[in-house]
Image: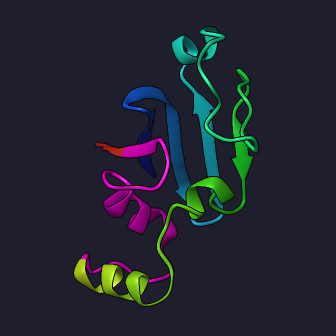
Amino acid sequence: MRKVAVYIKDEYAGELMEENRRHYVFRYDPVYFANPNKPPVSLTLPKTQAEYHSTYLFPYFFNVLSEGENRVLQSRAFQIDENDHFGIMMETATHDVIGAVKVKVIE
């Protein structure tokens, strides 16, 4: 299992887990959820106390990944399978991403 902490504008919002390549879970942090002034991660992941489950990496997180030649270069540089979306996200979405959401690896 691999996990990342999800931050919105540098504020901890929740946790994203890859239990295996066919099962992903996202859940909001209870403190973040309880604050009505805090926005959801995306429109497709509205704030709720329930966990979200998916058989593929949630589209919002998949869409922060690079494509094409940049993705090939990143997968080579980090020695990650080009189809390991979660692994590439763990390496590249920690800084300099489009939008307000960043991730940090949870050991």
Q: Residue at x 67, y 59 (%)?
A: 59
Quadrant of res 4: top left
Q: Residue furthest front?
A: 99
Depicted 99 relative to depicted 37: above or below: below
Q: Is residue 89 visible?
A: yes
- The spot of residue 41 in percent (x, y) is 61, 37
Q: Quadrant of the C terminus?
A: top left
Which is more toward the observer, 86 or 63?
Answer: 63
Q: Residue at x 61, y 32 (%)?
A: 27
- In the picture, measured across the screen, residue 69 lies left or right of residue 56, that is left
Q: What colour scheme was applied to this rendering of the protein?
A: rainbow
Depicted 49 relative to depicted 79: above or below: above
- The spot of residue 101 in percent (x, y) is 48, 43
How many numbered circles does the render carry?
0
Q: Is residue 58 visible?
A: no
- In the picture, measured across the screen, residue 103 lies left or right of residue 55, that is left
- The spot of residue 81 in percent (x, y) is 40, 82
Q: Does residue 33 show up magenta in the picture? A: no
Which segment is the magenta one?
Answer: 78-103
Which is more toward the observer, 53 or 35?
Answer: 35
Q: Residue at x 40, y 55 (%)?
A: 97
Which is more toward the observer, 84 or 100?
Answer: 100
Q: Does residue 95 show up magenta in the picture? A: yes
Q: Residue furthest left?
A: 77
Quadrant of res 90: bottom left
Q: Residue at x 61, y 40 (%)?
A: 26
- The spot of residue 34 in percent (x, y) is 62, 9
